[in-house]
Image (cartoon, rainbow, N blue to C red):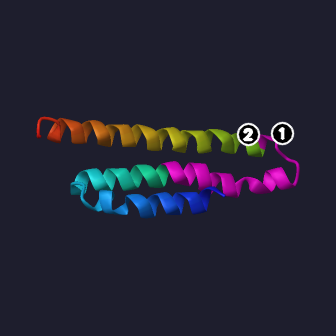
Amino acid sequence: MAAPITLIFIALYLRFLVHLPTTTRSLFIVSAAIFLGGALGVEIGTDIYDRKDLMDTLAYNLWTPVEEGMEMGGIILFIYALLRYNADHGSEN
């Protein structure tokens, strides 16, 4: 369910992304890839644990910090990109 919504979101903001400076655009894309890799990628990879009723196992519980770490890492990188953009272009009108 989240993948189609993500694709719609990307399509809507693609023009905005293209007009950003190269460094900011690259950081936005990398941060989104890290975040979505955790939110969607790890989630899809661990879906088998839910289907087989293995949610309370060591294997599943070891994947949880990987997923959350990727999500938080993506957000941290995105915030860095925003602050860097603001520092470079904040005084412009």
Residue in the foreground of this view, choosing between 87 and 69: 87
Give left or right: position of 55 versus 67.
right
Position of 64 compared to 20: left or right? Answer: right
Q: Main secondary structure of the magenta part?
A: helix
Q: Residue at x 78, y 40 (%)?
A: 58
Task: Give the tally of numbered discs.
Answer: 2
Figure quadrant of residue 40: bottom right
Q: Position of residue 93 (x, y in %)?
A: 11, 40
**Which quarter of the image is occupied by the N terminus?**
bottom right
Which residue is at 82% across, 50% downward? Answer: 50
Which residue occupies the foreground of this view, 6 or 38? 6
Q: Which residue is mark 2?
A: 61
The part of the image, by quadrant, that contains residue 4 is bottom right
Horizontal and vertical percent for residue 60? 75, 45
Q: Amino acid at mark 2?
A: Asn
Residue 65, image x, y percentages: 62, 38
Asked where in the image residue 82 lies, by quadrant, the reply is top left
Magenta stretch holds residue 38: yes
Q: Amino acid at mark 1?
A: Asp
Determine whether 28 is above or below 72 in the image. Answer: below
User: Mark 1 and 2 residues: CB-CB less than 8 Å, in contact?
Assistant: yes
Residue 49 belongs to magenta span = yes
Q: Tell me the magenta residue range.
A: 35-58
* Rendered location of residue 36, percent (x, y): 53, 53
Disc on res. 56: 1
